[in-house]
Amino acid sequence: MLLQLLADFLSLITIGMCFVLKIPQILNLLTAKSADQISVVGLLLELTSYTVMASYNFTNGYSILSYLEYPVILLQEYILIFLVLKYLNKINTFSILVSILYIAISISFAMQLIPKVVLTILAPLCTPISVSSKVVQLVAIFRAKNADTVSPITWFISAFTNLTRVFTIWMDSADILLLGNFIISVILSSSIMFSAIYYRRHRAKQN
């Protein structure tokens, strides 16, 4: 009983923090008016992972508290992707068509117009997709040797909320696919956070 209450409490904290997860990163972009150290490929992989996992949880009827952060993060992800594409001058006919296709597929998943078995197949792929998105972002930071437009706060929140989700998912469904995804995400989000802090401090010392 106490463990379940703790899980529900952590779920609420996780969801609450996810309301501001991408806000520091969005504000960084608006201030810098540049997206040079942000990986578009990484963002799109992240978007794919969030969309599949939100659909997977929804169609499986899991407790809303165990995955409410996904739709919350997705809304912020849309804004973030728009800003990155804008500052990289990549908003064009192709990107608009891809957006329309994404919306159509997302609705089809939610309404189960696409068989649920497809999500069951895609869900295990979210771990390597999530890993890839974060690895790509790490590589972007290392190549630039600069993290001025990367927000350490965003990645701290990401690492912390993923860590709380390890416990709440274990309590709610003990779904191995979800647990594996969150554990790996904790490690990689922490790596990006520490890398961003390192390069920011290194740059500050040089100045």
Image (tube, grey):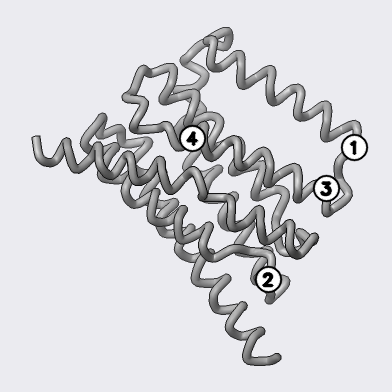
- Residue 15: image quadrant is top left
Disc marking residue 86: 3
User: Going from the N terminus, do you reach mark 4 or mark 3 first?
Assistant: 4
> What is the number of callouts on the image?
4
Question: Which part of the image, by quadrant, shows the C terminus?
Answer: bottom right
Circle 4 packing at 10 Å, graded few (<14), some (14-19), many (20+), is: many
Q: Please tell me the numbered disc located at residue 92.
A: 1
Residue 67 appears at what percent x and percent y? 40, 32
Tell me if 205 is positioned left or right of 159 in this view: right
Say what amino acid the circle numbered 1 marks: Asn
| 87 sits to left or right of 1 | right
Residues marked 3 and 1 touching at CB (< 8 Å): no
Identify the element where label 1 is drawn. Answer: loop
Query: Residue flagged by tag 3: what amino acid is it?
Result: Lys
Q: Is residue 192 above or below residue 14?
A: below
Q: Left or right: 83 with respect to 57?
A: right
Closer to viewer: mark 2 or mark 1: 2
Q: Crowding near pointer 3: few (<14 within 10 Å), some, many (20+)?
A: some
Work out which quarter of the rendered image holds the N terminus and state it.
top left
Marks 4 and 3, Cα distance to the nearest angstrom? Answer: 24 Å
Q: Secondary structure at mark 2?
A: loop
Secondary structure beneath label 3: helix
| Secondary structure state at the residue bearing disc 4 | helix
**Earlier residue among tags 2 and 1:** 1
**What residue appears at the point 46 percent right and 45 percent down from the top-left corner?**
18
Q: Earlier in the sequence, mark 3 or mark 2?
A: 3
Q: Which residue is mark 2?
A: 148
